[in-house]
Amino acid sequence: MQGNALTVLLSGKKYLLLQGPMGPFFSDVAEWLESLGRNAVNVVFNGGDCFYCRHRHYQAYYQTPKEFPGWLRDLHRQYDFDTILCFGDCRPLHKEAKYWAKSKGIRFLAFEEGYLRPQFITVEEGGVNAYSSLPRDPDFYRKLPDMPAPHVENLKPSTMKRIGHAMWYYLMGWHYRHEFPRYRHHKSFSPWYEARCWVRSYWRKQLYKVTQRKVLPRLMNELDQLYYLAVLQVYNDSQIRNHSNYNDVRDYINEVMYSFSRKAPKESYLVIKHHPMDRGHRLYRPLIKRLSKEYGLGGRVIYVHDLPMPGLLRHAKAVVTINSTVGISALIHNKPLKVMGNALYDIKGLTYQGHLHQFWQADFKPDMKLFKKFRGYILMKTQLNAVYYGIFNFRKITN
């Protein structure tokens, strides 16, 4: 069922697990590995990691980030691990671990959100997203045989579990902050700030249910195939910091709106979709309003929040993204796609390779035969039919 992704994951004998998703997932993975006869040791870096680490074999890291490679070297002498697992390969400590592992010939496997969501999660050796080792040559995929569709369990990640795990993770991180004084989180680590953002997110969600209730029907009917969809990512997405030339999502908004105002068909519209996980942290309405006036766009820009992505994609003329996995969803919907950053699916034949200025009126469609081969390959090589925030089903997929 899981193909090569599961085989790669289970190819080690002794595992070191660094930070996982907020919650018990990596603790469950360690216990699952041991049930299969492997050795596994978790590493905890803060109070949140400690709170969720139920695994009996763990090590705590109290030192500075600069001392991490030396600490790994000493730990390797003790445990002789052959595989490192982590969630996200752009966190500073995980970057250090990746460089160290490569120099020692130790396997480095990164978990990530699914490339094909919501029923899948990603695991790759060497790196994920733009660091993926997946080929970018379209001829590689064209030469592949057709792959039978695997049986997929219809799993759904639980939003409430994700929120609950995040709440406890941040609270325990703050409560035990004096135990880990040298720890530096890759994002804000204040439970009070995050709590304010989540409360704000909830109230905005309720507000948008009222204020935007007529937007989707308009897009589905009056503006069907007349709008370009620009997808936003969370403001602190490591994909933007590490795999694009943008310093901020606002720079992307500015570039897209400017180009649209100069080169897009005058009868077309631009729909800018806010990321749902960013609802309580950022609001771009003032910026979009100012740029619309500055670039003479009038009412041609529509800023939306909680509208369903499949519906937005289905009725869009084309899609622009930095490097969100929504790009893969756009290809599933056979939509012309322009990638503004570095993405593993930015392949000739799948995405528009020219300048954004030309994209708005380009006669381009993705090669769906190529996409079918590409999708089948990444499904086999990198995807596991599982979720991070829900029922842990790894024992089931190995039976």
Image (cartoon, rainbow, N blue to C red):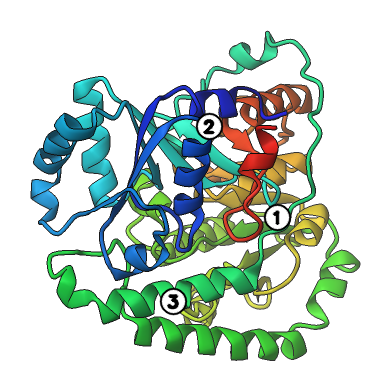
> The N terminus appears in which quarter of the rendering?
top right
From what the image shows, is residue 137 above or below residue 49? above
Q: Would you name the residue on which mark 2 appears?
A: 36
Q: Determine whether label 1 and label 2 are within 8 Å by CB.
A: no
Q: Nearer the viewer, residue 378 or 121?
A: 121
Cα distance in 3D space between marks 3 and 2: 30 Å
Instruction: Using residue 77 as the reference point, say whether residue 216 is left or right of it.
Output: right
Q: Nearer the viewer, residue 373 or 356?
A: 373
Q: Which mark is residue 168?
A: 3
| Residue at image point 13% right, 70% down | 181
Q: Position of residue 94 (x, y in %)?
A: 28, 45
Q: Is residue 266 visible?
A: yes
Q: Nearer the viewer, residue 122 or 70?
A: 70
Q: Would you name the residue on which mark 1 appears?
A: 265
Residue density around tag 2, few if under 14, some if 14–19, many if 20 or more, within 10 Å? few
Q: Position of residue 298 (x, y in %)?
A: 64, 77
Snapshot quadrant of residue 262: bottom right
Instruction: Using residue 182 as the reference point, say whether residue 231 is left or right of it.
Output: right
| Residue at image point 74% right, 34% down | 365
Instruction: Using residue 192 as the reference point, say whether residue 144 is left or right of it.
Output: right
Cα distance in 3D space between marks 1 and 2: 59 Å
Q: Is residue 362 visible?
A: no
Snapshot quadrant of residue 243: top left
